[in-house]
Image: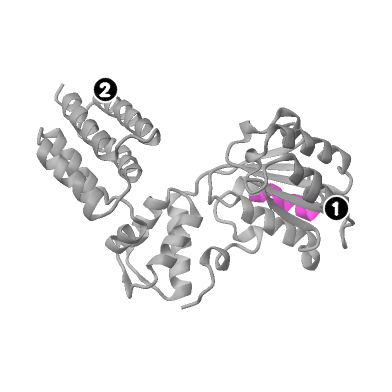
């Protein structure tokens, strides 16, 4: 089995290979054809193709000189004003090779401090003739208005489940893995539109001769929907002891994190045979449980408290 990281091995090399995101890719292709691009903001969830699109754009725009004319910087590593005044500014003032401009790709740009963003705005103005900026972020609202107004904004959406399954099937075929249909569905459900996560799950599962949905849930340390549904079913029937037993099986025997169980409960609540009013109350209780977990509360106590409140809500 190859030692290469699969997220890089199966990263699309061209814009045409990018999964989903047609509304972004079509515009980028037109700009590549014109050999001119504006400053851009790529906003959206992780693993949806923001970095891939930036690299593919540079490869198609600059050809063999793309390495010399493209700089990738992660703003979460160096988020202060020094990274803008140093590395970014130095590259912006350097000469492009075989092209009219260079591209600076600033990943996780919403991590930049306010001072760094102001310095970046001035750099974008000063080197507008020779440099284009692509700012990647999860939340474009965290970028200051002077930067946002200078960029074309593209919203990347989570990849559809069907597209994730096709992508995972391509990896399975490329690596000659024996993967059943239920496993493909499990990977697509767990990754929630994040292709990077889907790829990492597949590489972790590759040690097994046959990949089933149970293998996927075990490797990914994700709560099995059937276990969560059974726990909630016990709670609905007023069987707190049975619900608590299943909860501790997930926490202790399966080694799941409380946050993973909360996310699984959130997905299963909407499949319950209960009215909208009861579901709304349960979601509200679950949100309070998650908040307390994030504040450092004891997982077992908070999840037990949720199940107790679940019984009270569902019995009304």
Task: Specify which label sits upstream in the sequence, 1 or 2.
Answer: 1
Q: Is residue 206 above or below residue 235?
A: below
Q: Is residue 226 visible?
A: no
What is the x, y in percent for residue 143? 67, 33
Pointer 1 local density, CA inside 10 Å: few below 14, some 14–19, many at least 20: many
Q: Give the crowd class for mark 2: few <14, some 14-19, many >=20 residues within 10 Å.
A: few
Work out which quarter of the rendered image holds the C terminus and state it: top left
148 sits left or right of 292 in the view: right
For the point 54% across and 50% down, the residue is 48
Q: Secondary structure at mark 1?
A: loop
The percent coordinates of residue 13 (x first, y second) are 64, 64
**Percent coordinates x, y for residue 147 in the rendering:** 74, 34
State which quadrant residue 258 falls in. top left
Region in magenta: 25-34
Pick the residue in front: 316 or 291. 291
Residue 149 x, y percent position in the rendering: 74, 31
Taking the spot 40% from the left edge, 35% from the top edge, the residue there is 294
Number of numbered markers: 2
User: Residue at left 87%, top 44%?
Assistant: 127
Quadrant of the image occupied by residue 275: top left
Disc sitting over residue 34 in the figure: none
- Using the image as rendered, state which of residue 164 and residue 302 is in the foreground: 302
Q: Which residue is mark 2?
A: 277
Q: CA distance from mark 1 to mark 2?
A: 57 Å
Compared to residue 31, the image places residue 236 above or below, namely above
Q: Secondary structure at mark 2?
A: helix
């Amino acid at each position: 089995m190859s030692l290469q990281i699969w997220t890089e091995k199966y990263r699309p090399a061209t814009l045409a290979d990018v999964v989903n995101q047609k509304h972004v890719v079509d515009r980028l292709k037109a700009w590549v054809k014109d050999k001119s691009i504006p400053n851009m903001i790529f906003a959206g969830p992780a693993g949806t193709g923001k970095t891939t699109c930036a690299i593919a754009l540079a490869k198609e725009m600059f050809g063999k000189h793309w390495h010399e004319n493209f700089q990738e910087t992660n703003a979460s590593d160096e988020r202060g004003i020094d990274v803008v005044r140093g590395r970014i500014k130095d590259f912006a003032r350097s000469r492009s090779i075989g092209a009219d401009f260079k591209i600076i790709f600033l990943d996780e740009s919403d991590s930049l401090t306010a001072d760094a963003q102001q310095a970046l705005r001035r750099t974008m103005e000063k080197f507008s003739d020779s440099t284009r900026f692509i700012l990647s972020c999860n939340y474009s609202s965290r970028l200051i208005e002077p930067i946002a107004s200078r960029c074309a904004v593209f919203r990347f959406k989570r990849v559809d489940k069907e597209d994730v399954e096709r992508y995972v099937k391509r990896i399975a075929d490329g690596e000659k893995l024996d993967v059943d249909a239920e496993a493909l569905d499990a990977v697509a459900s767990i990754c929630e539109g994040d292709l990077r996560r889907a790829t990492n799950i597949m590489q972790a599962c590759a040690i097994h001769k046959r990949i089933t949905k149970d293998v996927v849930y075990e490797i990914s340390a994700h709560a099995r929907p059937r276990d969560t549904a059974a726990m909630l079913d016990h709670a609905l029937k007023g069987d707190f002891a049975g619900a608590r037993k299943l909860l501790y099986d997930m926490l202790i025997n399966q080694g799941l994190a409380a946050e993973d169980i909360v996310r699984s409960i959130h997905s299963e609540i909407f499949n319950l045979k209960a009215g909208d009013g009861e579901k709304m109350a349960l979601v509200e209780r679950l949100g309070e449980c998650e908040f307390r977990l994030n504040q450092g509360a004891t997982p077992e106590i908070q999840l037990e408290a949720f199940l107790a409140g679940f019984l009270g809500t569902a019995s009304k």
